[in-house]
Amino acid sequence: MRKPQEMTELDRLRHSTSHVMAQAVTHLFPEAQLTIGPPTEEGFYYDFDRETPFTPEDLAALEAEMAKSVAANDPFVRREISRAEALELFRDNPYKLELIHELPESEQISLYTNGDFTDLCAGTHAASTGEIKAFKLLHVAGAYWRGSEKNKMLQRVYGTAFPSQAELDAYLERMEEARKRDHRRLGRELGLFMVTPTVGAGLPLWLPKGTVLRETLVEFMRDQQRRRGYQPVITPHVAKRELFEMSGHWIAYKESLFPSMHAEHEELVLKPVNCPFHIQIYASERRSYRDLPIRYAEFGTVYRWEQSGELGGITRVRGFTQDDSHIFCRPDQLVSEFHGVVDLIMLVLNRLKLEFRARVGLRSTTNPEKYVGTPEVWEQSQNALLEAVQQLGMPHEVAEGEAAIYGPKLDFLVKDAVGREWQLGTVQVDYVLPERFKLEYTAEDGQPYRPVMIHRAPFGSLERFVGLLIEHFAGAFPLWLAPVQATIIPIADRHGEYAERVRGVLTECGLRVEVDRRNERMQAKIRDAQMQKVPYMLVVGDKEAAAEAVAVRSRDQGDLGPIALTEFMRQALAAMDTP
């Protein structure tokens, strides 16, 4: 049998619990076909082929059945068998047979048994079911067998387990908080984005307020890029297949590409990345060492065919926009350019007060076929990136196998308000694509040399970044980012004219404001603005109109009382400038 995956004690506990869950399914729903059930970062799952969907009541019944197995304290017993025995044992289960047939002839096949349940498994497990102290079945989702849409859709039952009930309770509390912050629900309630089957799965539509939020981030990044000498470019959404064959993306992304389009004897592809286009712009002119570095930046939309079971809101989509940039520089400029990119990413994270950790991704030594470029070029690029990171003095971890297809990278993993990590900003060092495209610059000695490329995206993708921000802030965005920064609420119809004048003054100074002139009671309007998580509610009546003032209610501080309009404007603008 294949060498068991290295597991922590928590992994073993969760893997064991997945077997206990599968055992319970065989007791209560014997018609279900078993497939696989690994541990995950958050818990475990097991996939079942069963025509009737599992219900919440089924999950409760399974938990009760699992408790019987835990109380029995059955040992997990490993047994090795021959291929012929395995094929006979699982003769009625096509999924297990497929796994068995894939094993090399030389590998031993192992089983694990607890009580009356036996499963094909490499391990490892807890000593007995009694070690399972706290578990919970969470929900059911669809999942294709082996992750391929060409295969049958199965039912995936998710669960989790912890060494103690206290740890499980804390986890469930975090998950309940995460549910309240779910960007899909808040995106709908706050009018930020929508996804419709008429347009297609994984292709979100940005609503007006969501567009304001997104464009605020774009304007912030554009301003920072202008200050740092980036040049804006715009590139097409499609290109000839040959472009991505040259870059290596045709092979690396082949399973994620949309189907090709054919027109006038050309095969066109929706672009999965922007870098080959920026390379063409660089290569369109002769370049001198004096021209470098050249920094191209684009908010470029790219397309990747994610499987439907993996799509979710705007954090996993099929069309997304990257704040993409590619820097072409001399080798002696690499470290300073790398540091400049990291400085920009840090500015973004600090502006939003986001916690993060840094991870250096290197090429896998066991699967080098995943990457393009020679080992010599990879060694050069990895050494350059590691040197740049070390000079920064930034705490970081090194992860083999996390590199991009053409070079090592520094990723920023951001922690949200409930402790989950999101991989967002990235900076990558690339010696490979300049070589593949034969890029050159003329050095001081008159000879041609290869530039080095830096790929960077501080936000990562705007969709994923906004999804993180929605959940991190639970929709209550910082003032500078809020789609509507203030709602003006006239007490009566006769105060509408003054409310509109206040709106004009505040809009002129750069604030995003609305007037709520609905035929509703004032308290209902205040409640609705609070539900929409608007930072300021400005109530205006006779007294406020006479005094050129507004009665201010803050989302975060409550009732602040009447404030002169000019003073409120000064305070709001100052608050917007506060990082």
Image: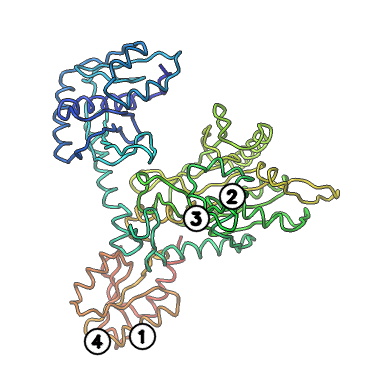
Please tell me which of labels 3 and 4 falls first in the chain: 3
Quadrant of residue 360 in the image? top right
Left or right of 37 on screen, residue 298: right
Q: Which residue does the numbered mark 3 point to in the structure image?
A: 348
Q: Which mark identifies residue 501?
A: 1
Label 2 sits on a secondary structure element that is helix
Quadrant of residue 488 in the image? bottom left
Q: Which residue does the numbered mark 4 point to in the structure image?
A: 542
Identify which amino acid the numbered label 2 is placed on.
Arg
Q: Nearer the viewer, residue 149 or 503?
A: 149
The image shows residue 529 at horizontal and vertical percentages of: 27, 69
Q: Nearer the viewer, mark 1 or mark 4?
A: 1
Graded by Cα atoms within 10 Å as few (under 14), some (14 to 19) or many (20 or more), the crowding at tag 1 reads few
Identify which amino acid the numbered label 1 is placed on.
Arg
Label 4 sits on a secondary structure element that is helix
- Image quadrant holding the N terminus, namely top left
Please tell me which of labels 2 and 4 falls first in the chain: 2
Please tell me which of labels 1 and 4 falls first in the chain: 1
Q: Nearer the viewer, residue 490 or 109?
A: 109
Residue drawn at (30%, 33%), measured in percent from left and top? 43
Graded by Cα atoms within 10 Å as few (under 14), some (14 to 19) or many (20 or more), the crowding at tag 3 reads some
- In this rendering, the answer to whether 494 lies above or below 571 is below
Q: Are marks 2 and 4 in contact (CB under 8 Å)?
A: no
Residue drawn at (13%, 30%), measured in percent from left and top? 64
Label 1 sits on a secondary structure element that is helix
Quadrant of residue 436 in the image? top right
Please tell me which of labels 3 and 1 falls first in the chain: 3
Left or right of 74 on screen, residue 269: right
Disc 3 versus disc 1: distance between alpha carbons? 35 Å
Identify which amino acid the numbered label 4 is placed on.
Asp
The image shows residue 564 at horizontal and vertical percentages of: 35, 80
Disc 2 versus disc 4: distance between alpha carbons? 67 Å
